[in-house]
Image: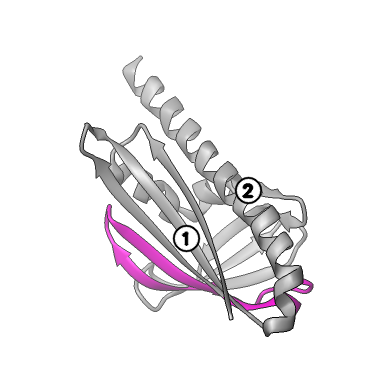
Amino acid sequence: MHLRLLAERSIAAAPAAVYALVLDGNRFAPLFEGYGPIPGLERIQPLGPVEVGAVREVRDLRGAVLHERITALEPSQRHAYTLYDLPAPLSWLAREGRAEWRFQAMADDPGATRVSWRYDFELTGPWAWPLAWPVLRGAMQPAMRGCLERIAQTLEQAWRAERR
């Protein structure tokens, strides 16, 4: 049984800039502040070269360590990974989360990007649904939306600084 989450946003930056920020663990981690029971991120540390099959260590602000295995890297277009070693109590609800980011140049503004961030959580069983729904839909999805907003703000600030 799966639970799908989706967050989308237009960002006033080229796909290459958005893609680069999302893949940069040092820049991305503080932009994921969490929401409710979903903690923010302290850091994302690659455990080798950033390539398909590589693993990155994800440490949240509560000190829990998760891992993500990169499953797709298509520069400026797509990035995907599987998040595993979920900490309790999330591990009681979901075995893993498969994430996919898509970056698409907007037809009416080639300097802007439509970002789509999807998570498919594999639930531990059908009994987990009544608890997973409010936790993931009610907290993880807003955390994802907030992160996209902070990405947009960060890239807009960088663009303004370049113009000075």
Please name whichever residue, 46 or 14, is drawn nearer the observer in this view of the structure. Answer: 14
Quick one: label 2, few (<14), some, or many (20+) residues within 10 Å? some
- Residue 68 horizontal/vertical position (percent): 52, 72
Does the image show residue 45? yes
Quick one: label 1, few (<14), some, or many (20+) residues within 10 Å? many
* In magenta segment, residue 26: no
Q: How is the image coloured?
A: one colour
Residue in view at x 39 percent, y 38 percent: 10
- Residue 49 horizontal/vertical position (percent): 38, 70
> Which disc is residue 142 wearing?
2
Labels 2 & 1 near each other (Cβ < 8 A): no
Q: What residue span does the magenta drawing correspond to?
A: 68-96
Please name whichever residue, 64 or 106, is drawn nearer the observer in this view of the structure. Answer: 106
> Is residue 64 left or right of 157 when viewed as pictured?
right
The amino acid type of the residue labelled 2 equals: Pro
Q: Residue furthest top?
A: 164
Residue that mark 1 sits on: 118
Residue in view at x 59 percent, y 81 percent: 1
Residue in view at x 37 percent, y 62 percent: 79
Please name whichever residue, 10 or 47, is drawn nearer the observer in this view of the structure. Answer: 10
